[in-house]
Image (cartoon, rainbow, N blue to C red):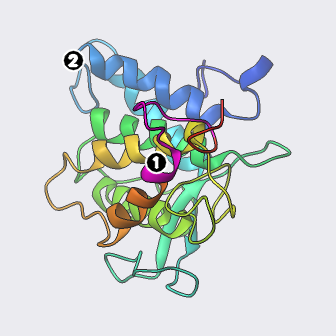
Amino acid sequence: NSSGFYWLHDIYADHVASANGMALTAFGAYGYCAGQGNVAYSDVIEQGLSNLLTTCFQAAPVSTGQCRYNPDSNSNGLGIHILDTADQNYEMYEMGSVMTALVSLGHPDDNAPASALDGIRNRSYFNIVQDMVDYCAWAQTDDGVGRGGWRYSANYASSDNSASWWPVTGMHAAETWDGIVIPEGLRDELAYWVAYSQDANGSFGYEGASSP
């Protein structure tokens, strides 16, 4: 629509970031991206990315306080996460699709709009994506049986595999940009969750190996 969003109603009304991230990524799957001038869909993609950055992103401090490793790979003290209007925050579900959209459709040296929030406005896509990676690292579950995974929101104190694969998907896409760093220690922590949630037959459960 005229705002640059694809879904603003029905079941997606509270989760526009993920819905629009996936819709935008579909353009990338067919070879379209931002900054192509008059090439088909370029203006649609640019407007969609601009509106995601302006209305769905927020910068937040990250620290090593409760973490088993340093999540702040660029040492700027910031992470970037998704603003979600739902009663229950589902930001970790949304991070992956939005990161993938930025990487597949944008360019590392593109800049966020001046109308975006503090910590995001006028920053390069590269730096935004790096801070999203750092936020995912900071948000990782630190203790208990869910150690190393993710759930609905940051530091949820438990994990499940419906949520955990989304940050991993986004960080996998982010690594395709030269210079993006996955904080050292994240993969080691993730290995705890993978081992805990995988059954001897090779399958993975929802909240653990024996969970449906």
Q: Position of residue 49 (x, y in %)?
A: 44, 37
Q: Residue furthest right?
A: 87
Q: Magenta stretch: give its range.
A: 195-206
Which residue is located at x 52 percent, y 45 percent? 197
Circle 2 sits on which residue?
31
Residue 4 appears anywhere in the view: no
Residue 199 appears anywhere in the view: yes
The reply to whether the C-beta atoms of the residues labelled 1 and 2 are less than 8 Å apart is no
Kind of residue at disc 1: Pro
Q: Position of residue 157 (x, y in %)?
A: 69, 64
Kind of residue at disc 2: Gly
Could you tell which of marks 1 and 2 lies nearer the N-terminus? 2
Q: Quadrant of the N terminus?
A: top right
Q: Residue furthest front?
A: 200
Q: Quadrant of residue 153?
A: bottom right
Query: SS of the residue at dot 1?
Result: helix
- Mark 1, Cα crowd under 10 Å, few <14 / some 14-19 / many 20+, is many
